[in-house]
Image (tube, helix red, strand yellow):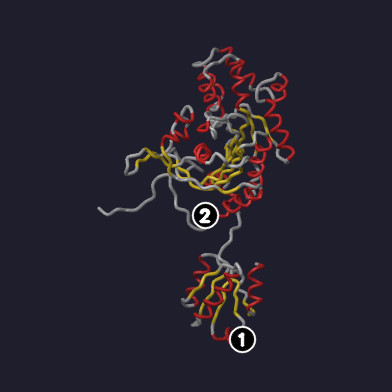
Amino acid sequence: MIYEPETVKGFEDYLPPASQKRDKIKEIAKKYFKLYGFLPVETPLIEFDELMRSDNIGEEDEAVRDRFRLRDRANRNLGLRYEFTFQLARIFKQNPNLKLPFKKYQIGNNFRDEPIRTGRTRQFTQCDVDIIGDPSVNADVECVSVVFDILKELNITNIELQVNNRKLIDEIIKSVQITEKQSVLREIDKIEKIGEDEVKANLKKYADSNQILSLLKLMEKDVPFFKENMFSGADELTDLIKKCKEYGIKARFNPRLMRGFNYYTGNIFEVSIGKTAILGGGRYDKLVGKYLNKEIPAVGISFSIEGLMGLCEKEINELKVETTKAILISIDEDKETIRLSKLLRKNNISCNVSFDKVGKALEYANSYQIPFAIFIGKDEITKKKYKIKNMQSGEESFLAEKSLISKLKKT
């Protein structure tokens, strides 16, 4: 039986132009991460399973449950990285003298063995920023602001920032004397998906009718109510909304926003289009310092490139990407063609070199949307001027070396 090669379900190949769009998103993300003072970090794709599994980070959530597990030749339990955040605990244990606040960004592949859908694959490229060691709301808003700048440059503008606070959620549940906090949180998180009536029915496993009614009524209140009644987390949430406004970002309080049941500790935030989240994050003050037996404040936000491309298809398709600027076509003048290619590249002008027949070279240029073709033949060398053809308009002209470089740099 002949093997027919195919990709594993949930994993994708990305070829031009999709690969170019992905590269452009990474470039834009990196540009703003650097502008905000975040520094690059790289971590291993493979970690010991003990670092990742639930007995180290509380009750098992979906991301932990869906991790890929493997063994090496020494029969050690290992796993593929499913996010960047849990690795910070190991990093700070091994590097306890890192100067705080530590602002890091990371762009790389993560893996989850989870159901696939639009914008969700089992291998995904995550773009992540974190600020470690700053307990203030300023750090929270820096994380929100940097991703808003990225989305703006990607022309993704029909978005909404929703915010909540885990301390506030816990306090609301406690105030109505419900003890099964985690189970209740999980049910409330399903309201958008399955509706309030079904959630009410599910909540009866953990609370009586009066408690459920009181809980849902409380969750209709606004932030000032919770602040006036001295609910934990209300002050942090008030400061977050106020500080976002100073950055020109409108934040809407959503008491049903849950996120990361097991490690978020304070403000949480999510950016959505309609009812679908495209990125999110929050404060996780109890995770980073756990192997140092101390609390280190931390906050972060992340998005996946697959998520953006799947949910913002129109905007990403309109994204202008850089193509190879020119193709140099040698007409029996290989040495001069190579010399010119080295000169163009020295001037940061991308180019391909072709030693094929002219027709074949032009066909290649068209297939990859290379905008200019430059011909190098005996006449060009004699006149010290190169024929350059605009592949879109068909316009041709003869330019000296300096003028050629100038034109290619400007277009």
Indicate which disc residue 383 carries. 1
| Residue under numbered circle 2 | 18
Whole-percent x and y of residue 258? 57, 29
Badge nearest the viewer, 1 or 2: 1
- Residue 385 in the image: above or below residue 11: below
Q: Secondary structure at mark 1?
A: helix
- Most extreme residue toward the bottom, as rendered? 382
Q: Between residue 329 and residue 260, name the one nearer to us.
A: 260
Give the quadrant of the C terminus. bottom right
Mark 2 neighbour class, 10 Å CA radius: few under 14, some 14 to 19, many 20 or more: some
The amino acid at mark 1 is: Lys
Which residue is painted at 43% across and 43% down in the image? 46
At x 54%, y 83%, the residue is 377
Q: Residue at x 62, y 37 (%)?
A: 133
Q: Residue at x 44, y 38 (%)?
A: 115
Residue contact at pointers 1 and 2, CB within 8 angstroms: no
Q: Mark 2 falls on what kind of element?
A: helix
Q: Is residue 359 left or right of residue 234?
A: left
- Seen as rendered, the residue at the extreme front is 97
Q: Earlier in the sequence, mark 1 or mark 2?
A: 2
Q: Position of residue 28 (x, y in %)?
A: 61, 52
Residue 397: numbered disc: none
Q: Amino acid at mark 2?
A: Ala
Classify mark 1: residues with Cα within 10 Å, few (<14), some (14-19) or many (20+): few
